[in-house]
Amino acid sequence: MEKSETNAIVEYARRYSALCYENDTIDDALFNQHHVFRGLRDKKGHGVITGITNISRVEGRRIVDGEETYCEGRLLYRGYNVIDLAQNSGRNKRFAFEEVAYLLLFGELPSETQLDEFLKILCDGRRLPEEFTRDVIMQAASKDLMNSMAKSVLTLASYDPLVMDISVPNVLRQSLELISAFPMLAIYGYQAYNHYICDGSLYIHRPDPKLSTAENLLRMLRPNCQYTETEARVLDIALILHMEHGGGNNSTFTTRVVTSSGSDTYSVMASALSSLKGPKHGGANIKVMEMIADLKEHVSDTSDEEQVRAYLERVLAGEAFDHKGLIYGVGHAVYSLSDPRAKVFKAFVKKLAEEKGRMDDFALYSSIERMAPEMIAQRRKIYKGVCVNVDFYSGFVYSMLGIPVELYTPIFAIARIVGWSAHRLEELVNMDKIIRPAYKSVIEEERPYKPLEER
């Protein structure tokens, strides 16, 4: 497209966008009048029930003697507490991501024989079609690695002769192959971006069949393929904590909606990736990192809690950072008193911070974790309780692992595709109707058509 044509489109869109605002803006009062819950959440923050799942349970409140009460957060994977799964990881020197993936997909923890077979299947899937890395991933390299991954996933459909077969055995096969391939799609996409756009060196390391997903991620990312045991263990925990979070989160609901239409696995996963990349969903940890960087620029002594508190007050007042009045990484739609994922993470974060000499940063994060919920509750008059969420610490972990910011959300996707796959399979097994929610139309009356010459 010629530059002049591009400029003409830009100018046209600028002028006519006013019509979009004029004709698409809906009066807030209409939502109350018609009892429509914006964002599918009622005035108490409860999600509108749109389905039933047996995969996981997210709990932040309970009914006691007929009254709703807020409780410590719980996250169950197929009935197992995620805290137990994380704390028992690493036994017998095994990494646990693959074991928990088996649990989510098949409903039970595997025996040693079943786990060994599952590991071999995932290992066999860690390969891409011939020349795929060169011809697809390296072409049109992008800083937006989520778009790069979505492009790669959709292109993989061209290599699958059974792409439109949505029988459960075939979808399970496709899901296992994508779970295996996602680390390569993400890391190779980053290496292409780093080389072609950032002018860095190009490293393409093949995954080692003897290593876990967490180990291979670090191996493929780093020029020398080296990592410590602690680094790999903490990343393994991060993957477990991000693997699944109920059917109501945006990307998992997207997975189920697109699945219900009868679409293919590659289109479904590309749709889920597109949902996850939104900053309101998968990009929250990046905002935490940006906020902490801004804090360090404007606070002379981060160990002085009064200075830190004053900065946070300015953030809440919309006078600091991005002027949106939000302390990122604090607060959650479901959890009130605690996010179990953040509680698990913190213990492992401390161990990594000690290894990396980042205890001053760890102390800063801990002080914000202590102060921010109280400050938010007072200013916003939130009575259900406010707690830090998993995003508060995950970006800090990734920075200590030397993982580039561009890979933060793709790593989330590498974990969450397991949950997406489990929900896609559950939707297929129980699929009866296409998911088609209703929208209330506020068009009041039919308008008479006018011929062009009379307009």
Image (cartoon, rainbow, N blue to C red):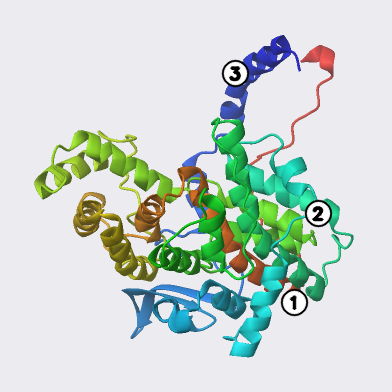
For badge 2, the amino acid type reads: Ala
Circle 2: element type: helix
User: Residue 361, how many percent across, how many down?
Assistant: 24, 51
Q: What is the crowding at mark 3: few (fewer than 14 residues within 10 Å), some, or many (at least 20)?
A: few
What's the distance in space between the residues labelled 1 and 3, CA to CA? 47 Å
Q: Quadrant of residue 108?
A: bottom right
Callout 2–callout 1 Cβ contact below 8 Å: no
What's the distance in space between the residues labelled 2 and 1, CA to CA? 22 Å
Residue assigned mark 3: 14
Residue 157 is tagged as 2
Which of pointers 1 and 3 indicates the residue nearer the eye?
1
Callout 1–callout 3 Cβ contact below 8 Å: no
For badge 3, the amino acid type reads: Arg
What's the distance in space between the residues labelled 3 and 2, CA to CA? 37 Å
For badge 1, the amino acid type reads: Val
Residue assigned mark 1: 429
In the picture, the quarter occupied by the N terminus is top right
Q: Residue at x 46, y 45 (%)?
A: 404
